[in-house]
Image (tube, grey):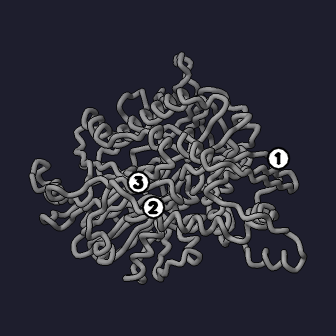
Amino acid sequence: MSSIEQRAEILLCLSPAEVANLKEGINFFRNKSTGKDYIFYKNKCHLRACKNLCKHQGGLFIKDIEDLDGRSVKCTKHNWKLDVSTMKYINPPESFCQDELVIEMDEYSGLLLLELNPPNPWDSEPRSPEDLAFGEVQVTYLTHACMDLKLGDKRMVFDPWLMGPAFARGWWLLHEPPSDWLERLCQADLIYVSHMHSDHLNYPTLKKLAERRPDIPIYVGNTERPVFWNLNHSGVKLTNINVVPFGIWQQVDKNLRFMILMDGVHPEMDTCIIVEYKGHKILNTVDCTRPNGGRLPEKVDLMMSDFAGGASGFPMTFNGGKFTEEWKAQFIKTERKKLLNYKSQLVKDLHPRIYCPFAGYFVESHPSDKYIKETNIKNDPIELNNLIKKNSDVLTWTPRPGATLDLGRMLKDPTDSKGIIEPPQGTKIYKDSWDFEPYLKVLNTAAEDEIFLHSSWIKEYFTWAGFKDYNLVIRIRSRVDVIRYVVKNGLLWDDLYIGFQTRLQRDPDIYHHLFWNHFQIKLPLTPPDWRSFLMRGEQNGSGTPQEPVNPTETNSLWKTKHNGRRYESKHRRNRKKNFQDYNEK
């Protein structure tokens, strides 16, 4: 068994100026300290990179003068040719793919070129597949990204979100979970939580579970920001969180092991998992953008991944400038199609025996998010599966709550009528009502906290946040109950942005990675000390209380400038009708 934790090694660093000077097409670079050579391919704002090393006999690539499109390079040894735009060799055709490297932008628009090492950790101590008895391995879909796996006499659950909202009040479950979901969770031998987003790490669900099994083993990857960074403040009493290194098999019993891998684009927070039972692999890439830097095991028995899109506030929550309704609709249509084609190609390349699209079954069901629900069009899993079947012979499974796939049966005979057992006739599949009130009450209670009676709370909050030395003015409209809940509890801004709780304008239209990365990933791990803040106000006589603000009648406009430290706050009282118009646009 491998005892070397998988790590991301830095191969090359480019300065912001060097990144800005990258030309369209092929770019050659050398790391002067190591003498190693690399190739970048730029297509508008998209970059790909690889080692300048031919797979045949290690020759050096040079620009292919016969290539008029400027996409291929030629090996100086035997004239092998590589299309750097696809990372596939075109001479000899249909031969190899070049191993792609991980590109990570730093906080100042510089670039790091990374390689995951070891690159294929699942190959350590390989096991040959054994015959599976019928019923020995069963995979039951519960909701969204939550699967219940029976693996011999062990049970494993992925990402349990089975009640309440995600991202404050922005996401709600599309599917009705099976009525026995809590029993299933309580019977699990272990749970895997892929990352900290609340549609995967869902505290309402885990609170219900912890009331009955606080010591249930939960496994997470060793990400830069701990997955359960907010556990103590959440009030959820879980006592058996296990943080495991990347790329090392975790042995559960003699037949069962699993390995957690990092994402190549967001290694600080996102992970995926390989589960192996008797040599049969189940690959779950969850929400990873480039799981394991794009290198994944081929021909696994079952692969599952996200598919839907729509998990971002962009562009639906933006307005002004180019962000017309027509522009947003066309952008969403184009991006969803790109995602479908990417997922279809990925499945074709990896060629699993069975593929299942999941982790995209959510809906913006609160009436105040009617506009988001109508405009945030998501991909159809059936459309994706049809595209996969058109391009390959991979079997596909579009899951419904409570449906069970018997892996042993499906591998032996895909036409076996008992290979996939659908939920009983009449089972409720889609939710048609949601219990909003308890969760909105929590948000409203935070909005009325006494800290917001003091005008200096904004300065206190941004001082705590630690974002400084950056000249930026932003204007964000946000629902008062959500922003105050986030501020009071020191939460990440995913609740605001991914949860569709903001309305944004950008002028000029520039994405400030440093700002958003800080507030979505790098905020302090402990919330602001509001008790000390209030005590200081009493002792100094500062922070004059304001008239209490009714969160159902107010929008909040912030203006923050990070150049030194300057903070301004303006609360605008609106009539209730105006607030309703804002919610229902």
* Mark 3 residue crowding within 10 angstroms, few (<14) / some (14–19) / many (20+): many
Q: Position of residue 245 (x, y in %)?
A: 50, 69
Residue under the image location 66 percent in, 28 percent down: 23
- Are the two marked residues, 1 and 3, in contact with CB atoms closer than 8 angstroms? no
Give residue 436's mark.
2
Which image quarter: residue 273? Answer: bottom left
N-terminal of the pair, mark 1 or mark 2, is: 2
N-terminal of the pair, mark 1 or mark 3, is: 3
The image shows residue 106, relative to residue 490, as above or below, that is: above
- Are the two marked residues, 3 and 2, in contact with CB atoms closer than 8 angstroms? no
The image shows residue 122, relative to residue 74, as above or below, that is: below
Residue under the image location 47 percent in, 40 percent down: 376
* Mark 1 residue crowding within 10 angstroms, few (<14) / some (14–19) / many (20+): few
Question: Split into 4 quadrants, where in the image is the N terminus?
Answer: bottom left
Look at the numbered disc 2 and give the secondary structure of its residue: loop
Q: CA distance from mark 3 to mark 2?
A: 31 Å
Q: Position of residue 168 (x, y in %)?
A: 53, 60
For disc 3, the marked residue is: 285
Question: Split into 4 quadrants, where in the image is the C terminus?
Answer: top right
Residue under the image location 26 percent in, 72 percent down: 255
Give residue 241's mark.
none
